[in-house]
Amino acid sequence: MSQTRLTSKLTFWILVGMAYLTLSACTSSITAPDLRTPGTVIDDVLIQQRAAKLLKEELHHEKDERIRVSVYNGIVLLTGQITTDERKQRATEVVENIEHVRAVQNELTTDDFRGVVERARDSYLASTVRARLLTAQDVDFDKFDVVIDRGKAYLLGYATKEETDRATEIIRNVRGIKAVIKVMEYAD
């Protein structure tokens, strides 16, 4: 009886921890101070919402598809999974036609479906990367946003090349990060 109760408690706390890690990645990037103008932030939020809605309507998400839309200064990053290369191309076309979209970087993959554990690992990595950038003395965290997918870190933002290189170095040194892909606009 006590072994069963212990197992139940352990299972409960593991699930709570996984839920926390998963949901921590769902927070909006506009809750932190932001160097973009309020109008640009609003445009980015509207682009993100419009893109998510149109992708759902146009592509009629299939079972194993998961598309994440991230936007910074009108530059859209698509990450996640999609079933075919044709659908990946269609996703780009749908998003390119949205007002105020300046560019689309489509990083959707047709790889195998990822489970909860893999997505939780990405959430953990995202939290770790954000904490490292936030505490770095020589990096202005407000100039960047980071998206983690399959262990790859996508660095979005508007900064100098030097600032971007420093942020990239910090991210590369986080255990579990496989690559850093820059989706940046340079101030210099």
Image (spheres, rainbow, N blue to C red):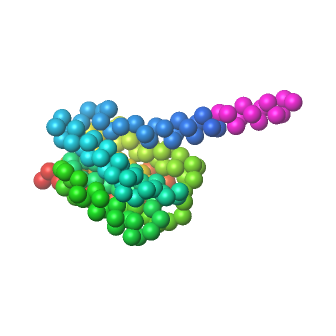
Which SS type dominates the magenta stretch? Answer: helix
Q: Is residue 12 left or right of residue 143?
A: right
Decide: is 137 above or below 105. above
Range of the magenta residues? 1-13
Q: Is residue 175 left or right of residue 117?
A: left
Is 12 contained in the magenta span? Answer: yes
Instruction: Please indicate, yes or no, whether residue 170 appears anywhere in the rendered image.
Output: no
Q: Quadrant of residue 95?
A: bottom left
Decide: is 111 above or below 129. below
Instruction: Please indicate, yes or no, whether residue 40 appears anywhere in the rendered image.
Output: yes
State the image coordinates of residue 131 (x, y, percent, origin top left).
Answer: 40, 39
Quick one: which residue is furthest to the left in this view? Answer: 188
Q: Quadrant of residue 113?
A: bottom right
> Nearest the camera: 163 or 149?
149
Q: Quadrant of residue 182?
A: bottom left
Give the residue drawn at x 43%, y 39%. 26
State the image coordinates of residue 15 (x, y, percent, origin top left).
Answer: 63, 38
Give the residue drawn at x 12%, y 53%. 188
Quick one: which residue is furthest to the bottom in this view? Answer: 85
Give the residue drawn at x 58%, y 49%. 117
Q: Is residue 20 left or right of residue 169?
A: right
Q: Quadrant of the N terminus?
A: top right
State the image coordinates of residue 42 (x, y, percent, origin top left).
Answer: 22, 38
> Nearest the camera: 142 or 60?
60
State the image coordinates of residue 24 (x, y, percent, origin top left).
Answer: 46, 37
Is 146 contained in the magenta span? Answer: no
Report how many numbered discs are placed on residues in the image. 0
Q: Is residue 122 left or right of residue 54?
A: right
